[in-house]
Image (spheres, rainbow, N blue to C red):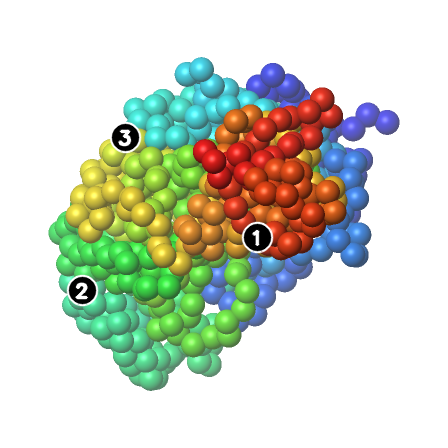
Amino acid sequence: MNYPRVEVEYGTNRLVMETGKLAKQASGAVLVRCGGTAVLVTVCIAGKAREGIDFFPLTVEYQEKTYAAGKIPGGFFKREGRQSEKEILTSRLIDRPIRPLFPEGLFNEVQVIATVLSADPENDPDVLAINGASAALMLSDIPFDGPISAVRIGLVDDQFIVNPTYEQRAQSKLDFVVAGDAEGLVMIEGDGKEIPEAKIKEMLAFAHKALQPVRAIQVQLQKEAGKAKTQVETKVVPPAFVEKVRGLGMARLSEILGGTVDKKTREKALNELFASLVADMTIYAGFKKGKADISENDVKAVFEIMQYDVMRKNVFERQLRADGRGLNEIRALSAETGIFERTHGTGLFTRGQTQSLATVTLGTKIDEQLMEALDGVTYRRFMLHYNFPPFSVGETKPVRGPGRREIGHGALAHRSLEAVIPSPEDFPYTIRVVSEILESNGSSSMATVCASTLALMDAGVPIKAPVAGISVGLISDAQRSVLITDIQGMEDHFGDMDFKVSGTREGITGVQLDLKIRHISVELLGQAIDQAREARMKILDTMTAALPAPRTTLSAYAPRISILQIPQDKIGEVIGPGGKTIRKIIESTGATSIDIDDEGKAFISAPNQAALDCVMNYLSSMLEMPEVGKIYEATVVKIMNFGAFCEFMPGRDGLVHVSELSDKFVKDPNELVKMGDTFPVLLVEIDKMGRYNLSRKKAEKK
């Protein structure tokens, strides 16, 4: 049987979409293939709306099955468990571009599940899953204003690449996933190695053109196999009721949103106004006995629309924001380092009422994070974790493990800083940064970038350049579009865009775009990029005023690490039989660990500089070739009736014959030396069997 199928060129491969064969009971299902990678995406909708909610209940689940790459899961249970970081980030990557395209007032649960069924070593399934989600929604009976499509872009040898392989991504100067429709872009997620703004604009224009063919085949597939869209009933509040609420509260609301700087003061005033509207029972007159079922949730919905309207009107007509700032004005900035003694590095960054405290911990190679994914096992030596406790927004709620939001914000900050982290050769430490959000009123992820940079410099990590981040928002209608710099929580909630841009003075290192509208033009995004750069320079000025460059010394409490190259023919000698020699070195010098790779590179860690110097001297002496005629300090390790064996170099023993112990006759070596005695010896000879002959009496004469 022939099933509906479409395909298109996608980089050096072809992207294929098929439907009708798999998961036929889902509202919509599509199998997306590229090379040897295949992702099944299904969508379903609940039969009725969820009661008592005021948000669209969309859930997206991306699942990587290890069998897809011909592997068996590690661990005790031998089956997939909780979502990995990659699965969480990809779920968010699918959610963000499709969410704005569902109709307003849709409260039926919609679930998107993307399952990786096959994975080759070249094509990442994540972008296929985004395209598959859009295609499945287009095929289904679920209301959806699509399609959108997505493409990954790389930059190798100054040439943009569509759908780069894993190998090409490792060589690429940027890694961006861009989603959009025929007229503009709806989602961007990516990082770069200090890419100039002009190059990012060029890349976005290239990406918008590159994603059009995939969008076109979705339209074609829908024509062949799509279902008629269901008209989902949405609740409509009577217009007379809306006007009644607006008449009672609009004047006071305009006062509150006309320049209240403090977030808590503004929220208190808004809560009091809302409570007064709910308490005024006259707003229910004429509706309680009619067909309309009016409740407090309806008042809340109208109140939300009122805030939306007032905030936008102030921006359009008065160039005024809720806290009184101008459109391009950044909130008050402050930066501080070296706050705590025992931590290895700290940075405190505050922007208005958003505050991040970042802490750096330096570890050894053994502290690296093992990352097991479909594309293989890797080790992560730079980690960044983001925590968002409820007190940061003045709330009380249970404190659990990190949620998707925390994982996503931490990943954005991680990517933004990864470009400036020194190589293991330049700084052989494992680095963990933790950002604690102490206050939040918008763009805490960008505050995390700034605080983490300060903490890294305070810890003495030789980053290539300081990194700062800022968020640019958008207020728009059919005729106007206004960009605003450094958006706060209310502007994120009621605005149309959250465009986060981070980077150094030289260029961009991280970008994330979220929209609440259908799309934004590439040209307007270019203006936002320029506006973000201007703000970023001001923030970097504040940060470098607090600490101009990384400190040249590490914290007294940080471990000390050094790298020593051991010749290939000496690796076995250093390790010793069953690791005996290396254990002896660790015990005798106080080293924490000595890790030697197959190439002979030894990563040596110690709790302090004195212990590190001791182990480095020990290994250096051990690797030094013994020199005939040179005097060494030796320690007696074994006494025989014919002489004493002495360790004269680390790991090297030689014999001081009884006749070489003294100018006088010595009948029994025990009369002259004891175990553990130290004295100078002269290396007299290395015999044909590689044995070392030492002399105490000749050393004393010299």
Q: Amino acid at mark 2?
A: Val
Q: Looking at the image, which residue sits at the far front?
A: 665
Secondary structure under badge 3?
loop
Discs 2/3, front: 3
Q: Earlier in the sequence, mark 1 or mark 3?
A: 3
Image side of residue 634 versus residue 269, left or right: right
Q: CA distance from mark 1 to mark 3?
A: 62 Å
| Quarter that holds the N terminus | top right
Mark 3 lies on residue: 506
Secondary structure under badge 1?
loop
Above or below residue 345? Residue 250 is: below
Residue 42, position as x, y percentages in the image: 69, 44
Residue 261: image tag: 2
Mark 1 lies on residue: 677
How many residues crowd around disc 1 within 10 Å: few (fewer than 14), some, or many (20 or more)? Answer: few
Above or below residue 630? Residue 678 is: below
Which residue is located at x 25 percent, y 50 percent? 486
Which residue is located at x 35 percent, y 39 percent? 463
Discs 1/3, front: 1
